[in-house]
Image (cartoon, helix red, strand yellow):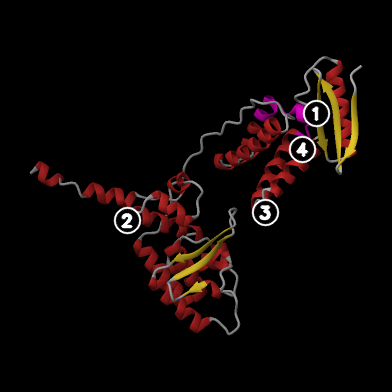
Amino acid sequence: MNSVWVSFQKNRWTVGWYENGKRKSKSLLSKAYAQSYAADIKVKLDAGNATSICRVPWEYLLHEYFLSKEAQKLQPSSIAEIKLTLKHFERLCGKLNSIHITQEVIDKFKLLRGRMGISNMTLNKDLTNLKAFVRFFSIERAFIRQGLNLKKVRASVKPVRALDDSQVKSLLQSLKHNNPDYYIRALLALSSALRISTIDRMEISEIHFDRNTIDTFETHKSGKWWMDRPIQPAVMTELANYLSTYVSEGQIRLIAAPYRRERWLKLCRQAGVKATFHNLRKTCCSLMQQNGVSTAVAARILGHASPATTRKWYTDVEPAVKSATEALPVKEWIG
């Protein structure tokens, strides 16, 4: 008979056993998980099988995985996105033990999730989250078998919707006349590629008129500060005028009234421009690229981890391509 024991050490339940003359152990979070793990180890040892992959329940996989993500201090939005992916997996494939997560199950999830009418980009996000989950337990924990294929599907790239000069001027002039709050929001997005969440949490104390900079906190996933972010003097002048005219004494936030999407779309219709607020961010990036700013610098300004994201989803260089084509001396060539 093969001996497998369960003990309580250092505030954790530990399963111990001998395999090929070597002592092995595994720490778990509860007595129930430890007893279940020990029973699985004993069955494998009695059958002469290796213990590298052992059965643990779905609830334990989720619990340990999210503990590790909290230890990494991930942003709540990132953790929520991972939880949503695993919720979809649980709904489509069931609450599986670790040994039951096989290639067939992965293919089933990929097929059923794709049939739900979602875009390939959304499906790829789910596959990325699921791949990290499987990798964590197959390599670091040896609960899920290695070598599972989670290859992404080909995602169609939508053309970037960037505003042209006439649309930008029309929008800013209309906003300045009808709603100064949204005018300042649009001006910051167009000149600095800031997200609406970053703009709306900006405080007056974070604006430095003496050196034409602002301090920004990126709330979207990364959660990083950018101290002394450079801003054009013309934008700083508009900020100063806004503060002196529309900001009440003792106000902390730059813009007191919260952003409302319905209000934004109504203001865009008044200006004769069709655009989401995020289109302003893409417009800023596209204009930088058209004026010779490198993708790496644009990615730094937008806060992207990879320049590939900037190049794929934010760059509209068609006007620059047209100008480059028109610059060729074709008339001189053909006489």
Q: Residue 179: in sight, yes or no? A: no
Residue 227 place in picture, x, y as percent: 51, 64
Residues under numbered marks 3 and 4 in contact, where contact means CB atoms less than 8 Å apart: no
Q: Residue 279: in sight, yes or no? A: yes
Residue picked out by circle 2: 291
Residue 156 drawn above or below residue 224: above
Compute the Cα span from label 3 to label 4: 19 Å
Looking at this rendering, what residue extends furthest in the left direction? Answer: 335
Residues under numbered marks 1 and 3 in contact, where contact means CB atoms less than 8 Å apart: no
Depth order, front residue of 151/120:
151
Q: Quadrant of the C terminus?
A: top left
Compute the Cα span from label 4 to label 2: 50 Å
Depth order, front residue of 38/12:
12
Residue picked out by circle 1: 55
| 305 magenta-colored | no
Compute the Cα span from label 4 to label 1: 10 Å
| 102 magenta-colored | yes
Residue type at mark 3: give it: Pro
Q: Kindly state the secondary structure of the residue where label 2 is placed.
A: loop
Q: Which residues are magenta?
A: 94-108
Q: Quadrant of the N terminus?
A: top right
Compute the Cα span from label 3 to label 2: 36 Å
Q: Kindly state the secondary structure of the residue where label 3 is placed.
A: helix
Residue type at mark 2: give it: Asn
Residue picked out by circle 3: 76
Q: Kindly state the secondary structure of the residue where label 1 is placed.
A: loop
